[in-house]
Image (cartoon, rainbow, N blue to C red):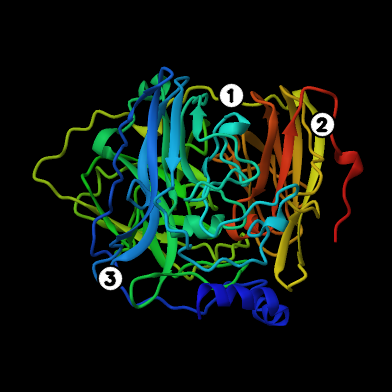
């Protein structure tokens, strides 16, 4: 069936849509099994660091292409058609330095006009009538790139309605072609990825994601493993057809996960390391899968500790050890959370470790077993002479102070309810405060003020909630939001996992920019289907509803 006829069927066949979607309201789709692929037969690719294309208004300037191409993801698969930045999946590493502006333009003019996947027009953002005060066309292929987690002006944020099509049609929120990145954070491991309204799940799954690092002298003074001993890790999942093409459901599925692990664009790769310390910059870039990561070896003997020193943004209060011998047994990352860790392999020459995953899908906070139990493999060399390693011992690492937010400065408490209902097509509809994306903006924090947000999850699985513009501290978890959060999620966050039946309390300071920004669930299927709301940072006295006007649950 052609794309056009399939879309017409989806628009006309409401009853068929209801029948097909109910089975996906809680679990994942199981309609596709990838070809059997041997694990650990290809090395882990390391994305290249992108060189600037010159200068623009005194700032380093990058002009990044967004194109469709083929790339081999596994030796036993035919080449796979993907979308990517600068002809690679994932895209190249873009680096900025603290307080030094960077300018970036994304050129998608060479993308085909047809999307790589079927576009379900029941999802808001895919038709002109979906937008207030807009009567222009909504092309099938359209992209906008968001710099995740950066403290950045509204016009450069890469928000959902700021999209552009290959033939130059722009969305109603489009502002400008060149993004200005001020790099205000002290350090950052993050991502640039697509954010187009109604199809971000399709665009990211097609391959539109890359690494973005902010470097600073403060971090460099710590003497962390660097150069070839600094390994970026982008964790994803995919499903494949027999011909090597990516499989994604033809119509909307609220909870979809691939059955194959993909790391840095390679299926189940291996990494060869020396017996010394390595830094890993980890990003969970899966559409909706949570990873709960462990190191395992075949003998079941001791494994090296994972020393986490940073979360999404700045440094933690102190290094947090993770592993079987520690309070926290594993590294838990919901979609788009990040972690910087150091692993010391110096006592494990000749050993092989498998990075395993125990998080169920959809994630409910149980960690009782995964349908994707293995992610990649690490092989430690056994050289005749021990390599020289002058990097700092992570167990003794003294971290610089982070910008911990003053809880006593909070002037407003807001209560947000995460809920699920069904839309008019019978599709699962996840909402924040029972409101959809284009409804009136009711959250209006004042510039330079601090607020407490309470995120109450009334649904059956976890939601990773992301706020644009700001980072925040997590100050409470549990049924009443009073349980102390884990030490590796207390500060420097821009995504927080909210488990079923739990209220998570976060402390947010709103600066340095005014304007409208979104906050949303970062399960991309939920974000695309209305689990996204705006907040507006203002300079006046408008403040929106607070905890005193708590909305009612379903």
Q: Which mark is residue 428?
A: none
Residue 535's quadrant in the figure? top right
Residue 123's quadrant in the figure? bottom right
For the point 27% across and 57% down, the residue is 270
For the point 43% across and 19% down, the residue is 57
- Which residue is at the front of the view, 285 or 121? 121
Task: Classify 505 as above or below 537.
Answer: below
SS at badge 2: strand
State whether residue 326 appears in this view.
yes
- Residue 343 position, x and y percent, is 34, 43
Q: CA distance from mark 2 to mark 1?
A: 20 Å
Between disc 1 and disc 3, whose residue precedes? 3
- What residue is shown with label 2? 412
Where's the C terminus, which quadrant? bottom right
- Residue 493 position, x and y percent, is 58, 38
- Residue 60 position, x and y percent, is 38, 24
Between disc 2 and disc 1, whose residue precedes? 1
Q: Along the horizontal axis of the image, is 155 left or right of 39?
A: right
SS at badge 3: loop
Q: Tally the marks.
A: 3
Disc 2 vs disc 1: which is toward the camera? 2
- What residue is shown with label 1? 403
For the point 34% across and 62% down, the residue is 300
């Amino acid at each position: 069936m052609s794309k056009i006829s399939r879309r017409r069927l989806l628009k006309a066949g409401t009853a068929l849509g209801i029948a097909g979607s109910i089975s996906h309201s809680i679990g994942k789709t199981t309609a596709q099994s990838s070809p059997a692929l041997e694990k650990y037969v290809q090395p882990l690719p390391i994305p290249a660091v992108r060189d600037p294309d010159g200068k623009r208004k005194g700032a380093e300037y990058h002009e990044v292409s967004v194109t469709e191409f083929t790339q081999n993801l596994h030796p036993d698969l035919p080449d796979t058609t993907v979308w990517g930045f600068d002809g690679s999946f994932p895209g190249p590493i873009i680096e900025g330095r603290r307080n030094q502006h960077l300018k970036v333009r994304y050129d998608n003019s060479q993308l085909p006009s047809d999307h790589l996947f079927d576009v379900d027009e029941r999802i808001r953002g895919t038709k002109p009538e979906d937008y207030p005060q807009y009567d222009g066309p909504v092309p099938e292929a359209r992209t906008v790139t968001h710099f995740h987690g950066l403290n950045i002006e509204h016009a450069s944020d890469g928000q959902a309605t700021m999209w552009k099509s290959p033939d130059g049609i722009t969305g109603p929120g489009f502002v400008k072609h060149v993004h200005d990145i001020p790099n205000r954070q002290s350090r950052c491991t993050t991502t640039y990825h697509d954010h187009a309204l109604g199809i971000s799940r399709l665009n990211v799954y097609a391959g539109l994601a890359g690494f973005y690092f902010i470097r600073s002298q403060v971090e460099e003074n710590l003497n962390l493993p660097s150069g070839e001993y600094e390994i970026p890790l982008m964790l994803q999942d995919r499903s494949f057809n027999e011909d090597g093409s990516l499989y994604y459901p033809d119509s909307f599925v609220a909870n979809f996960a691939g059955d194959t692990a993909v790391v840095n664009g390679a299926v189940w790769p291996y990494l060869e390391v020396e017996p010394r310390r390595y830094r890993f910059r980890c990003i969970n870039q899966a559409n909706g899968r949570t990873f709960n990561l462990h190191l395992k070896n075949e003998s079941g003997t001791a494994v090296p500790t994972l020393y986490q020193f940073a979360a999404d943004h700045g440094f933690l209060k102190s290094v947090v050890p993770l592993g079987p011998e520690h309070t926290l047994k594993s590294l838990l990352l919901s979609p788009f959370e990040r972690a910087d860790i150091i692993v010391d392999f110096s006592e494990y020459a000749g050993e092989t470790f498998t990075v395993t995953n125990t998080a169920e899908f959809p994630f409910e906070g149980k960690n009782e077993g995964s349908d994707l139990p293995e992610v990649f493999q690490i092989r430690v060399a056994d050289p005749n002479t021990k390599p020289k390693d002058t990097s700092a011992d992570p167990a003794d690492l003294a971290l610089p102070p982070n910008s911990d937010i003053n809880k006593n400065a909070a002037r407003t408490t807001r209560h947000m309810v995460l809920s699920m209902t069904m839309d008019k097509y019978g599709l699962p509809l996840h909402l924040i405060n029972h409101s959809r994306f284009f409804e009136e903006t009711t959250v209006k924090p004042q510039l330079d003020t601090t607020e407490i947000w309470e995120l109450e999850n009334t649904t059956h699985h976890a939601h990773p909630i992301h706020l644009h513009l700001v980072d925040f501290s997590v100050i409470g978890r549990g049924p009443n939001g009073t349980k102390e959060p884990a030490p590796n999620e207390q500060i420097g966050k821009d995504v927080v996992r909210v488990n079923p039946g739990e209220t998570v309390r976060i402390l947010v300071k709103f600066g340095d920019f005014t304007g409208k920004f979104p906050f949303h669930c970062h399960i991309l299927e939920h974000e695309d289907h209305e689990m996204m709301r705006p907040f507006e940072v203002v300079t006046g006295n408008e403040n929106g509803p607070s905890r005193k006007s708590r909305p009612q649950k379903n």
